[in-house]
Image (cartoon, grey):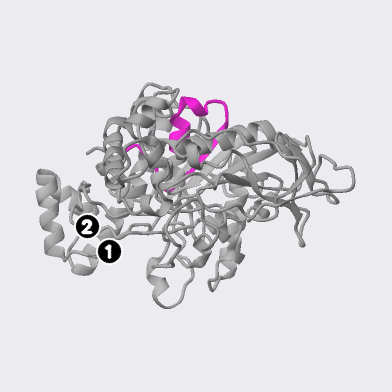
Amino acid sequence: MLYCVPRTHYKPHFMKKLSVMAICLVLASVSTFFYSFKPRNDVSKNTDTVRIGSGLISGVKSDSSDVVAFKGIPFAAPPVGELRWKAPQPVQPWEGVKKCDAFGPSPMQAKPTPFMVYTSEFLIPEQPISEDCLYLNVWTKAKQHEKKPVFVWIYGGGFTGGGTAVPIYDGEALAKKGIIFVSVNYRLGVFGFLAHPELTKESPNNSSGNYGLLDQIAALRWVKKNIEAFGGDPDNVTIDGQSAGSMSVNCLVASPVAKGLFNKAIAESGSMFILNPLITTGKLEGAEQQGVKLAETVHASSLKELRNVPAADLMKFRGQYAPIVDGYVLPKPIAEIFAEGRQNDVPLITGWNADEGFVFSFKKKEAFEQQAKEQYGADADEFLKYYPANTDEEAARSQVKLSRDMTFAASGYKWASLQSSQGKSPVYVYYFARKLPATADYVKYGAFHTGEVAYVMNNLKFLHRPWEPVDFQLAKLMSSYWINFITSGNPNGKGLPPWPKYNTNTKQAMVFDKASGKQELPDWGELEFMVAR
């Protein structure tokens, strides 16, 4: 899910007058006790205790299946005090058995508030929210050393919000299908993406700013080291993210620091290949200057003082927080890394949704056409062919479509095209067109941003909608494709409509709707037009 923050300096490429509303789609406690019996290191039907590198943990078996959920497992030391704005550090081992029966705190962010189409099923709980947030969750029905494929979920939220405790991110349904489901928290906003010259200076890697990505990498290292205890295969790991999580997946595929930690990737709605009107990325030097301004604003003259500033005060500073080219996690811009063939070349699924644009102030047809002429000059007629504005209503639909393309679809299209033409591994493209059943004002949102997630995870029961039988069939279909890809790197399987590999000649994609099947990628002409400029 995408979180948008107010833009104070950024001017979008086309809709520069678009009012980007602040979208705060945001998304327990861990106690220790001792068992009097000898613990066992498997998660078979009658036990819920395993040993990981830092100690023994216990989970909770589902009442309706053989799946055991381990929630709130610490994968790094709390990033507080002197560890604020440092790479994640190792967990201190514990004695006895740590109860992992509730989600850990969500990362620091604004209070979750429903808006637009985003009801509580898409949001984190109101409490707990804390800087002490580096926890992950595992759902499994496997026994130790079964070597089941592993799925790691990275949530969205515009890099300023989100968390693993969102209801539709529950991992039981996919774990029932035979994989190990892992979801991970990572630091957000000023806590996850602040750069500062002094932070760069103290870093052994001479970088700062990408702490949220380093958290994701630390979680993947934890998986590599510990997932066998849950019945998982550390050499068969798929990363999947949506919105900012999808952009995170793009960063991890590009990062040399993440090399060898996964061998398949899924990116739902977005990458960082092209300029995004809602998320600003940049280089270390510019991000450091923002950090200097923040320190001045909160009257901190040293890192020690800055680390002692209350979290609530830091969150008052309106900055731009997202992954940057820091020279370490991302040594170069992602497009350059791919152009040089230095990315982690793994099989990929990527795609986007039909109606996932964000427009909060619509232009009349005359104003929209005038902006097209000013922006595109001699190409304005071609632009208006793809985004027509013959009436105010048509202009409004085109503005939603343009927002979708600029924010999500064009960047995914660019990635798919590069993977197909230059990569060694296959890419599969989808287009989610199912307009989620709705009532009242929710009807207008159609196949909205994040709408596909409940289908992918076979979690329609967590989303309160007037579902039709076709929706449950679609959820079964999509989750089956995902399970196949997680298992083998190929979504195809017995009884499923064929999903061809994407290539730039035929442009065949899987369209998910009431009736799903392969067809030419919808709207590819306009996407080609956008990425060429």
Viewport quadrant of the C terminus: top left
Alpha carbons under labels 1 and 2: distance apart: 7 Å
Determine which residue is flagged by label 2: 18
> Residue 346: which disc?
none
Q: Position of residue 402 (x, y in %)?
A: 27, 54
* Residue 439 is inside the magenta segment: no
**Left or right: where 79 falls relative to 143:** left
Residue positioned most to the right: 37
Above or below, comparing residue 502 to residue 108 in the picture = above
Look at label 2 and name its amino acid: Leu
Does residue 424 appear in the picture of this structure? no
Numbered-mark total: 2
Q: Dot 1, crowdedness within 10 Å: few (<14), some or many (≥20)?
A: few
Residue 360: numbered disc: 1
Answer few, some or many: residues within 10 Å of disc 2's Cα (few below 14, many 20 plus, some between 14 and 19): some
Q: In which quarter of the image is residue 192?
A: top left
The reply to whether residue 253 is in sight is yes
Q: Position of residue 205 (x, y in %)?
A: 43, 23
Q: Is 371 or 106 nearer to us in this picture?
A: 106
Q: Considering depth in this image, is 339 or 116 the residue closer to the camera?
A: 116
User: For this rendering, which residue is in front, 235 or 304?
Assistant: 304
Amino acid type of disc 1?
Answer: Phe
Please give the range of residues in magenta. Answer: 250-274
**In this image, 393 relative to 474: left or right?**
left
Relative side of 447 to 529, left or right: right
Q: Considering the numbered disc 2 on the image, is that residue within a helix, a strand or a loop?
A: loop
Q: Are marks 1 and 2 in contact (CB under 8 Å)?
A: yes
The reply to whether the magenta stretch includes residue 273 is yes
- Label 1 residue SS: loop
Residue 472 percent coordinates (x, y): 60, 63
404 relative to 250, above or below: below
**Which of pointers 1 and 2 lies earlier in the amino acid sequence?**
2
